[in-house]
Amino acid sequence: MDIRAELLSLLRENARYTTVDLARMLGTDESEVTEQIEALEAEGVLKGYQAVVDWRRTDEEPVRALVECNVTLDRETGYDDIAARLVGFPEIQSLRLVSGEYDFSLTVEADSMGEVSRFVSEKVAPVPEITQTVTHYLMESYKERGFEFGDGHDDDRLSVSP
C-alpha cells in the first residue's frame, strides 16, 4: 500500500491523529504527511473531517430518514443532473445512486418528523423527474461509519428456551 492509501486509511480510522502521530505510523516525516494531506485536500479526495455522534447521548437528537426515490430519465436529463439539483439541499446528508428497486437513496435530517415530511413533499417530490418517494424514519442506530453505539454492557437477562 502506498503512503497516500495508508494515510487515507489512518485518517478514516481517526481524523484527529496529529501529523506527528501519522508520520510515526507511516514511517515518514511530518512534512511529508502535511504535504500529502494538503495535496489530498487540493485534489478533492479529502472532503472534510467529521465526528461520529451518538445522538441518543445528547439533548438534541435530530430526526433522520432514509428516502428512496425513483426517477424517469429523458434524453436531456441524466442521473447526474437530478443529483445536482438535490445535493444543494442542506437537509440531505447523503445522496447515493443505487442499484435495485429504486434509483436514489437519500439520508435526510431535520428537527422533527413533520419537517422531514414537508421537506420530502415540498422539495424532493416536486422535482419533475422524480416519480416516487418512500420515506423510512430511522428508529435506532447501532453502528455509524464503523463505530458501534451502545453502552458496551452485555445483555445479562436470562435466556429462556422451550
Image: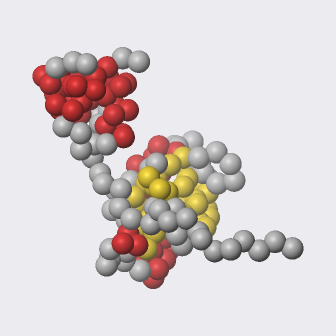
Q: Quadrant of residue 52?
A: bottom left
Residue found at the very far left of the displayed protein? 31
Q: Does residue 107 appear left or right of residue 26 in this picture?
A: right
Q: Can you see residue 9?
A: yes
Q: Quadrant of residue 33?
A: top left
Q: Quadrant of the C terminus?
A: bottom right
How many numbered callouts? 0
Q: Does residue 63 appear left or right of residue 70 in this picture?
A: left
* Figure check: 92 above or below 33: below
Please state which of residues 2 and 20 is positioned toward the viewer in this rendering.
20
Q: Quadrant of the N terminus?
A: top left
Residue 27, given in percent of the width and then of the height, sits at 25, 19
Please state which of residues 46 and 159 is positioned toward the viewer in this rendering.
159
The residue sitting at 24% across, 39% down in the picture is 17
The residue sitting at 21% across, 18% down in the picture is 28
Please state which of residues 119 and 15 is positioned toward the viewer in this rendering.
15
* Figure check: 32 above or below 134: above
Residue 155, given in percent of the width and then of the height, sits at 58, 69
Q: Quadrant of residue 70?
A: bottom right
Q: State how the image is colored.
A: secondary structure
* Figure check: 28 above or below 95: above
Residue 11, given in percent of the width and then of the height, sits at 31, 37
The residue sitting at 52% across, 69% down in the picture is 140
Residue 156, given in percent of the width and then of the height, sits at 59, 71
Residue found at the very far right of the displayed protein? 162
Q: Can you see residue 35?
A: no
